[in-house]
Image (cartoon, rainbow, N blue to C red):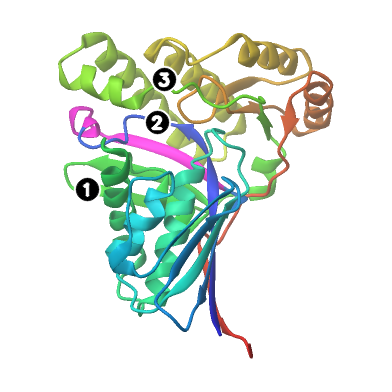
Amino acid sequence: MSIIESQAPTRIDLAGGTIDIWPLYLFHGSAVTINLAVDIYAKTSIKLRKDKKIIIESKDLKKKIEFDSINKIRHNHSLSLITQLISFFKPEAGFYIETDCESPAGAGLAGSSALNISLCAALNKLTGDKYSKKELITIAKNVEAQVIRVPTGDQDYYPAMFGGLNIIELSAEGVKAERIKIDYEKFEKRITLCYSGSSRNSGINNWEIFKRHIDGNRKIFKNLEAIRRTAIKMKSAVINSDYGMLSKLVGEEWENRKRLWKGVSTPEIERLINIAMKNGAVSAKVCGAGGGGCIIFLSEPERQEKIKSAIRSAGGKILDYRIDKDGTKVKYKKTKT
């Protein structure tokens, strides 16, 4: 029996989110997003079968479906991203495919994008490695848009595929991602990751921001411009390892993001941020769209353990992590049975 296993890291976004959705970045010159891959993984396992049957199981969602063959696949269910990708890659053999995501649901760590990349990598291996890593990113983005039926952003696929700290530049020339060489340990000691205990609010919708921007809403344009300017400044701070400026700009990004859409912050988020600040944090921001999910706290290294202890005592969940340096990994192996 042949087994293919893949895993892709999730990410902490530092600056420039939302503006990475095509074509919004075309209306903001020199748009940049910055993020960091972390070892909270989305995983895929494919076990080949001797028949044509396709069995799909999501461990984290606790869902399982099966089809007699690829020609019998339907997409009207909660695992439609998986079935759409299977239909795209068109594997000839039957198989059992299992997925699992270590990120809490609605955490804002781009778990769905990481799973998408993990699935693409595994299915690409199954069907003969026809596509490059950059081509797989395009496929992942396009298939996800087909599933959710709204435009998708670009930033989440790059840390999942390549790992590390990514500066992603978006312009009329296209999307260019650069991995920056940094002292990962110094970043880890300054960034504390906390899960608030509640998923993101579905009412905070990038699609609504997108539509209003396209319709000419000046407030949305102005707020995204502020987000862009902060990300440009953060690019310089990251390249120069200016941790003091990085911490300041994370706070600036958070203030800009709260002005972008009502409900980005919540009383619980503000409570946890206030506790962190009282215990040595310099700044904080929510990961992803906001309204719940994960929060990062920036601090000097000697304050990190005190912040973690205070957050745990307040009911928040600290997610221990390391920066993932490798991105997506795929293994192919044969077993005797």
Occupied quadrant, residue 140:
bottom left
Q: Read off the residue under disc 1.
A: 174
Q: Which residues are magenta?
A: 24-37
Residue farthest front in this picture:
68
Q: Is residue 33 magenta?
A: yes
- Determine which of the numbered discs, if any, sits on residue 204 in the image: 3
Horizontal and vertical percent position of residue 297:
65, 26
Horizontal and vertical percent position of residue 311:
77, 23
Residue farthest bottom in this picture:
336
CA gap between label 3 and label 1 equals: 27 Å
From the viewer's perspective, is residue 217 above or below residue 85?
Answer: above
Let me know if residue 239 appears in the view. no
Q: Is residue 247 left or right of residue 302?
A: left
The structure residue drawn at horizontal position 51% and vertical position 39%, both measured from the top left corner, is 238
Q: Is residue 211 magenta?
A: no
Let me know if residue 274 appears in the view. yes
* Sequence-wise first label, 3 or 1: 1
* Sequence-wise first label, 2 or 1: 2
For disc 1, the neighbor class at 10 Å (few under 14, some 14 to 19, many from 20) is few
- Determine which of the numbered discs, if any, sits on residue 4 in the image: none
